[in-house]
Image (cartoon, rainbow, N blue to C red):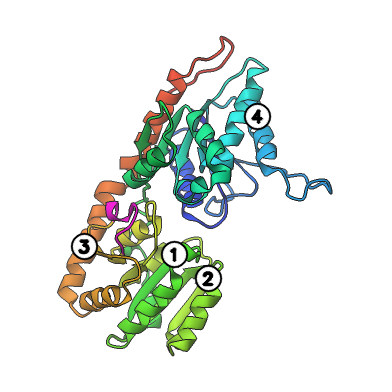
């Protein structure tokens, strides 16, 4: 099948997962076309069966803000016609699903057609979607999609509650990992060599307010008071300065290391002892899944889709947001009990592979694609190439 994929190509879980999905589909024999404003950050320069089409967003004095959604629709239309795509798979409702609908309407003028699958990842529903100014267009774009998926049961239920979406069926397809990549035994323990006598706590995110990175530092400070440890912070975003300032105020800045954005986090995760994710909300928690796959128990919050990923008390501990003392106590207890840590680590890696491996999840997307393509009425001249 020939599939066009559109996502936000910069740092973030939705773009990472969309890219990994495209790569996995190409390995399974599909032809994949990424249509975005820059090459996705996890996409290698060259892969057989994978193509990148840049969206050129013109800048004119008349436009205070460049009309990316319209430029994207035009590029989608071009790529569909030039490469004979069967389906557009868009990640995030706006503007991507909206642009895909425009592109499909344009294709009708030339007797062509295209199926549209929309995957909802989180803030397009839980934050942006609940802004009154976007509510109507998101609802419209979702309802105009041929098939809809959400990355967690939580997000599916939130979508239905927020938008209603008459006649829409939202299928839950969880995010996934490549077990070969997220394998603790595959990598040299680079952080362990650097900090041989201390426990290593990790956090990976976009450092936005919802991630509560200041809480990450506060939890670490309490853990460090009783367990020799370091905190490794991977990523960047608006709250990085505030987190750095908090580390200085608490007197732990020498043991808090900000590494910035790193595309391949598996080698770092494989050196870790605990992963901290005290978010206000997680529609899924891809970074937590990647940590679990590397045998790193997760200390996080009992919110959103995270309980679908972390088995509370078995592969990590989940408590209410803002419970700094409780989260720190849970982390300290695990680190102080080597047998408990080892049991959690072993189960975390096994559970991630059993429930969220590439081989378990990607076929669900392929089945969704087949249903979207075969169920859509098409003009007589339209192509259908469904393997």
Q: Is residue 262 magenta?
A: no
33 relative to 130 in the view: left or right: right
Q: Determine the CA span between mark 2 and mark 1.
A: 9 Å
Classify 10 Å Cα crowding around label 1: few (below 14), some (14-19), many (20 and above). many
Residue corresponding to mark 2: 239
Name the outermost residue toward the right.
Answer: 61
- The CA span between labels 4 and 2 is 38 Å
The answer to if 303 sits in the magenta stretch is yes
Vertical placement of 381 versus 52: above or below?
above
Q: CA distance from mark 1 to mark 4?
A: 36 Å
**76 relative to 339 in the view: left or right:** right
Q: Secondary structure at mark 4?
A: helix
Sooner in the amino-acid sequence: mark 3 or mark 4: 4
Instruction: Provide the residue designation for mark 3.
Output: 346
Residue 48 seen:
no
Q: Residues within 10 Å of mark 2 (few under 14, many from 20)?
A: some
Determine the CA span between mark 1 and mark 3: 26 Å
Q: Is residue 295 visible?
A: yes
Helix, strand or loop at disc 2?
loop
Q: Position of residue 93 (x, y in %)?
A: 52, 40
- Judged by depth in the image, the label closer to the viewer, 4 or 2, is 2
């Amino acid at each position: 099948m020939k599939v066009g994929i559109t996502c936000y190509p910069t740092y973030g879980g939705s773009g990472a997962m969309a890219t990994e999905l495209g790569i996995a589909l190409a390995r399974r024999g599909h032809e994949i076309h990424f249509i975005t404003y820059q090459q996705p950050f996890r996409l290698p320069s060259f892969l057989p069966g994978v193509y990148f089409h840049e969206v050129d967003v013109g800048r004119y004095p008349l436009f205070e803000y460049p009309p990316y959604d319209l430029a994207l629709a035009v590029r989608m239309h071009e790529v569909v016609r030039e490469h004979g795509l069967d389906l557009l798979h868009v990640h995030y409702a706006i503007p991507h699903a909206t642009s895909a609908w425009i592109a499909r309407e344009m294709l009708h003028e030339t007797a062509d057609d295209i199926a549209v699958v929309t995957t909802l990842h989180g803030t397009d529903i839980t934050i942006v979607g609940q802004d009154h100014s976007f509510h109507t267009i998101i609802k419209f774009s979702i309802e105009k999609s041929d098939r809809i998926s959400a990355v967690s049961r939580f997000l599916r239920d939130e979508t239905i509650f927020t938008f209603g979406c008459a006649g829409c069926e939202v299928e839950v397809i969880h995010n996934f990992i490549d077990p070969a990549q997220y394998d603790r035994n595959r990598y040299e323990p680079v952080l362990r060599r650097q900090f041989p006598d201390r426990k290593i706590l990790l956090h990976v995110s976009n450092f936005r307010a919802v991630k509560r990175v200041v809480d990450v530092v506060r939890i670490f400070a309490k853990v460090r008071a009783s367990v020799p440890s370091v905190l490794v912070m991977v990523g960047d975003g608006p709250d990085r300065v505030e987190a750095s300032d908090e580390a200085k105020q608490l007197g732990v800045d020498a043991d808090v290391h900000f590494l910035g954005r790193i595309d391949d986090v598996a080698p770092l995760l494989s050196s870790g002892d605990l992963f901290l994710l005290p978010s206000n909300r997680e529609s899924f928690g891809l970074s937590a899944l990647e940590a679990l796959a590397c045998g790193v128990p997760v200390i996080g919050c009992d919110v959103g889709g995270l309980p679908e990923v972390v088995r509370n008390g078995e592969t990590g501990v989940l408590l209410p947001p803002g419970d700094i003392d409780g989260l720190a106590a849970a982390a300290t207890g695990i680190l102080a009990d080597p047998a408990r840590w080892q049991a959690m680590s072993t189960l975390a890696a096994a559970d991630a592979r059993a429930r969220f491996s590439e081989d378990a999840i990607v076929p669900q997307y392929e089945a969704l694609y087949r249903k979207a393509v075969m169920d859509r009425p098409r003009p007589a001249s339209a192509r259908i190439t469904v393997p």
